[in-house]
Amino acid sequence: MTTIDAHAHVFPRIRGRIGDGPVVGLQYGRAAVGDGSVQILPPLNAHVVHNPLMLIAAMDLVGVDRAVLLQGPFYGYCNTYVNAAATEYRDRFAAAIASDPWKDGRRGFEKACKVAAAARAFKLEFSERTGLSGLYRGALLGTAELAWLWEELDARQMVLVIDLGHIGGLGYQTEAVRAVAARHPNLRIVIAHLAQPSPAVVRDRKTRNAWLDQVSLGLLENVWFDTASLPAYFAREPSYRGLADCLRWAVEAIGSDRIMWGSDIPATLPGATYQQLHDVVAERLAFLDSASRQRVFGGTALRVFWGETGADPKRGRSAIGR
């Protein structure tokens, strides 16, 4: 069984910008965000960096074979750096480029593709709190302004990884993504964080319906989800209460072959070890059969990001999927 982390990050420094202002790495895991600061890494190193060798060491400790390297405006774009990591450690990493399609347009995208020739994906961080919908508060994914981007990704056979942010946020544009996926059936789309469930999904039916509506995008043949940050969303709940419900509901709705494990390392490390980020999800998916677990923890990512069809070429349902 090949184990893959479908959502990880490396960066040489933190120099980004979000709606709250500039993001700059300080010392010992802290970063200045606008007028405040936040602990985003464990306080182990003076410099706030997460390089490929640090990630590989963590992967080896947990038994993770490969990882998908994503990026966005919070950490700052580092296309050349990520490309170098995926080139040097091609047996361990797949790289995703990133750019700002509103600020830099097609030219910025083409520049990113040029400096990151090894990239297999494009990450669009459209969340409100740490992404582009917070910078461009009226931005819409479904406008003609972005038609070129979906066409380019489709033509280049690149995976679109998109973070739509929290339920009810400005970036939570489920129907726009549905339209893009339908218009470009060959464009592989991965929605980060399993559409961002929270404890409110368990308690409030309206919130749950909004979440399940986005999860239902996985019924389309070209849409998948990763589970990055899910333990963090339920960290204040005793024993991550509610996380098991959300995972089960998602599997029942779209099948285990639409879901890939991801950690969101390193920003999730202040709250849990890398081993815990893996095990918390694995334990709550114990109801799946062995083949379904293999899809979640590696088989599906092999097909989506590496195009390796030998792992599990046919779309299948889990033992409890409808």
Image (cartoon, rainbow, N blue to C red):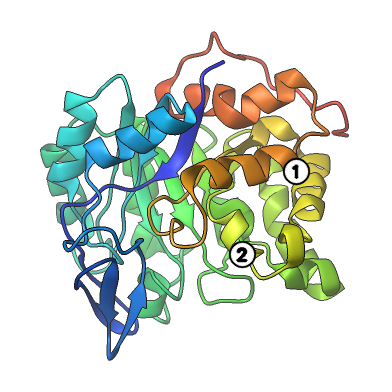
**Residue shown at 25%/50% (left/top)?**
50
Q: Amino acid at mark 2?
A: Tyr
Say which quarter of the image contains residue 315.
top right
Q: Which residue is mark 2?
A: 233
Q: Can you give x and y, in whole percent of width and height, for residue 240 in the image?
A: 72, 59
Q: Which mark is residue 160?
A: none
Q: Is residue 111 above or below residue 101?
A: above
| Amino acid type at mark 1 | Arg
Q: Is residue 157 left or right of residue 171?
A: left
Q: Is residue 174 found left or right of 213 in the rendered image?
A: left
Number of other residues with Cα within 10 Å of mark 2, as a class: few under 14, some 14 to 19, many 20 or more: some
In the rendered image, residue 127, in percent from the top left (x then y), is placed at 46, 68
Comparing 77 with 158, the one in front is: 77
Q: Residues within 10 Å of mark 1 (few under 14, many from 20)?
A: some
Check contact, mark 1 vs mark 2: CB within 8 A: no
Q: How far apart in space, not on screen, are marks 1 and 2 (Cα)? A: 15 Å
Q: Quadrant of residue 253?
A: top right
Q: Is residue 293 above or below residue 135?
A: above
Asked if residue 166 shows in the view, the reply is yes
- Image quarter where the N terminus lies is top right
Q: Is residue 187 visible?
A: no
Give the left or right position of residue 110, taking residue 234 as reference: left
What's the residue at 61%, 55% (across, down)?
A: 230
User: What label sits on residue 284 in the rendered view?
Assistant: 1
Name the N-terminal-most of marks 1 and 2: 2
Picture residue at 76% right of the left edge, 35% below the top: 255
Which residue lies at the image location 61% right of the left edge and 61% below the top edge?
Answer: 196
Give above or below for 313 relative to 184: above
Q: Secondary structure at mark 2?
A: helix
